[in-house]
Amino acid sequence: MNLHEYQAKSVLRDYGIATPRGVVVASAEGCASAAAELGGEAWVVKAQIHAGGRGKAGGVKLARSLEELQVFSEGMLGGRLTTYQNAPDGQPVHELLIEETLPIARELYLSLTVDRAAERIGLVASAVGGMDIEAVARSEPDKILKEWVDPATGLMDFQGRNLAFGLGLSGDQIGAFVKLAKTLYRVFVDKDLALLEINPLIVSVDGRLLPLDCKMGVDDNALFRQKALADIADQTQIDPKEAEAQGHNLNYIALNGDIGCMVNGAGLAMATMDLIQLSGGHPANFLDVGGGASAQTVTQAFKIILSDPDVKAVLINIFGGIMRCDVIAQGVIDAVREVDVSIPVVVRLEGTNVELGRKMLDESGLSIIASDDLNAAARLAVEAVAAEAAKGN
């Protein structure tokens, strides 16, 4: 679950980390009062969406007058902002963060994330902060600094100093950075975060370290103990199908293809999507129904897949272990009958009660394409989409 920038900065302030002063507005009319509250003669207008790359996409602008502030606000609010992270559809802009401007001497990069290979939380820093940090990581990896934290000790002072020296900080800035890094580590652990990114972390002209931007992603598996964060989730920022899937405890991510996928197990789901791609097709979604789903869960999953108008065929790939093949078969049969499916459905079953499951599908009287082989099933789904397209032409 992602937080908006203003929500993430609020969390930082709760831990004593200073941030630029800002006011959140939901209408262009509120900008004048926000400017009056902040003072100054210029303000930064930031669209609040759950995606990076806002600056290059026109979602962050410097307003040098009240007139510009009004124009920028009217241009952002109520529209959709498309960045390289949320293309092609973008996300709706319902709120803006109006912030004070600050004199910037340097821009740095700092983030914390879980390094699964090291099985530890890693701090990543760079003296080259700002919008092009991804390009820096690709072209000049030596400019990316890393420290891994031993969970038994937490972030140590020497690790913070290592990063501070690597960033070219000096004097009191070194101690300030160490304190900031250790506090961010505490935030990361306390809030069960999957990502905490500050880009840029600025050094102001007077030598202060301030997070000019902040992204936070909370581990979905920990939301049950992070109720305060779960309660402020902005559901408008995710695909409606994804929001509905969350309500049914389904792991669903919308993509831009035309072959709907229903699979049990994340690894098998990824392999199924890869095979669709290798067969010349394009998956419309990632959907893991889990190991213990019921026939009702499968029916609901089927409905969510078919609510995407771009889906031209459905590939169901189930390896029955905890979830038996006959349960899947019954769910598929119920869904096809209830939704009145008119597009091809390819089903590949294997595992517990597979013969019973296949028998149920065969005797259902429904137009379901059965396959015993995953590669063949992927090809059948791609061919079915091509056949449907040919009919349309």
Image (cartoon, rainbow, N blue to C red):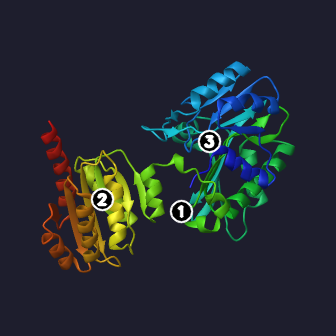
Numbered circle sitting on residue 83:
none
Which comes before the other along the chain, label 1 or label 3? Answer: 1
Which amino acid lies under the numbered mark 1 shown in the image of this protein? Arg
Which comes before the other along the chain, label 2 or label 3? Answer: 3
Which amino acid lies under the numbered mark 3 shown in the image of this protein? Lys
Residue that mark 1 sits on:
116
Please state which of the two labelled residues, at mark 2 or mark 3, is closer to the viewer.
Answer: 2
Please state which of the two labelled residues, at mark 1 or mark 3, is closer to the viewer.
Answer: 1
- The Cα atoms of the two marked residues, 1 and 2, are separated by 23 Å
Position in image of residue 82 (x %, y %): 49, 35
Residue that mark 2 sits on:
272
Please state which of the two labelled residues, at mark 1 or mark 2, is closer to the viewer.
Answer: 2
Position in image of residue 162 (x %, y %): 73, 51
- The Cα atoms of the two marked residues, 1 and 3, are separated by 22 Å
Which amino acid lies under the numbered mark 2 shown in the image of this protein? Thr
Position in image of residue 174 (x %, y %): 81, 47
Identified at 73% across, 34% down, the residue is 99
Position in image of residue 245 (x %, y %): 43, 59
Identified at 78% across, 48% down, the residue is 177
Left or right of residue 223, residue 203 in this image: right
Query: For numbered disc 2, what is the local secondary structure?
Result: helix
Residue that mark 3 sits on:
143
Query: Which is more toward the observer, 303 or 263?
Result: 303
